[in-house]
Amino acid sequence: MNEKLGQLIDIESSDYKNLFEDYNELIGQSKIDEAIKLLETIPKGHKDYSKALYRKSLAVYFDDEEKSFEIFQQALTMEFGNSNYSPAFGNLDNSEDFFLFALNMIYIFNDFQNAIKYLDLSLKIKPDQSEALNFKAISFGFLHKYKKAIKLINKAIKIDPDNSSYWNNKGAFLLEQNYPSKAIKAFDRAIELEPNVDSWSNKGTVYYREGEFVKALNCYDEALKLDPLNISSVINKASIYSELGQFKLADEYFQIACKLDSNDFTYLVEMAKHLINKGEFKKSIQYLDKSLEIYEDFALSWMYKSIALSELGMDDESEICFKKAVKLDPDSLSVFDEVFVIDD
């Protein structure tokens, strides 16, 4: 095992063990900003500073990949004197080494295929690592291989049956496989073990997709009791009210979401859909264009834009967007089966 690499991820001998444990808890609650502020209390000259940098790189990844990679490079430079350390430059013979590089593949490089390879190497040395099985399941989930993901998360649960995050992940995979009843049971188990925002919100999403809006709203309310600033639950409530034609309530919740993060991708897309429901097609296109600046290949943004342009009589432009959406994802056609408030 590379000794320095082991030190980079080991918190048992850390002076800031309790702080890192608090950081893990905040991350589990999706309180990213609070977690980062906690890490920043560790002084630069301290031996645990590189550990803080590594964890900070993971925390900022979803908001800023470039910054995340820069921070990760800083952590490696502090430990190894350069930022080009890779498995080729060391004698990796310990499960933790491979596990660390798997996390880097997931959170830093977004390379799930290689993440699975490193996790397999880690599991070959230590087969009963529930966390390695969990992250392998997550990697297959990102690759849309949900049957494999479910099989792996079941193994993780068998090893650690009281881990709420595993049950939450299982519910998410089951939902993607269109097993709503089984997904709800998994989320209920997660909530029973440890009520948290993610499990309540995910359970609400099951009911939302099934058209059981009252039950969905109740779940999002439970999530917001735990975290009033949880933007996904706010957005989902707004979207439900929009589909129900309760535009005043929808507007109120979309305003809350805007104050929380006006550049949130889901907010931009759902706000655009809400505006289509209200017949404000030109305004909806502004939000869709902003969403496409963030994620150019999101099929639903193109499909909603096609609908808005069609309503404005811009048929040629609408057809271009329509073809783009179908090429990116044929399932985007399903939006025509959704319940829009606008008349045909």
Image (cartoon, helix red, strand yellow):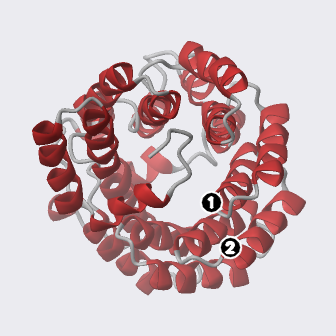
User: Residue 65 occupies which quadrant of the picture?
Assistant: top left
Comparing labels 1 and 2, the label whose residue is closer to the camera = 1
**With 158 as the anchor, is 107 left or right in this view?**
left
Residue pushed farthest right? 192
User: Residue 62 occupies which quadrant of the picture?
Assistant: top left
Say above or below: 287 vs 122: above
Residue pushed farthest front? 344
Q: Earlier in the sequence, mark 1 or mark 2?
A: 2
The kind of residue tagged 1 is Arg
Say above or below: 18 vs 103: above
Name the quarter where the N terminus is drawn.
bottom left
The kind of residue tagged 2 is Pro
Callout 1: SS: helix
User: Could you say where residue 56 lies in the image, as x and y percent from the top left?
Assistant: 45, 32
Residue 285 visible in the picture: yes
Residue tagged by mark 2?
180
Q: Residue at x 82, y 35 (%)?
A: 226
Q: Residues within 10 Å of mark 2 (few under 14, many from 20)?
A: many
User: Could you say where residue 323 lies in the image, as x and y percent from the top left?
Assistant: 15, 55
Task: Verify CB contact (< 8 Å) between mark 1 and mark 2.
Answer: yes
Q: Which mark is residue 209?
A: 1
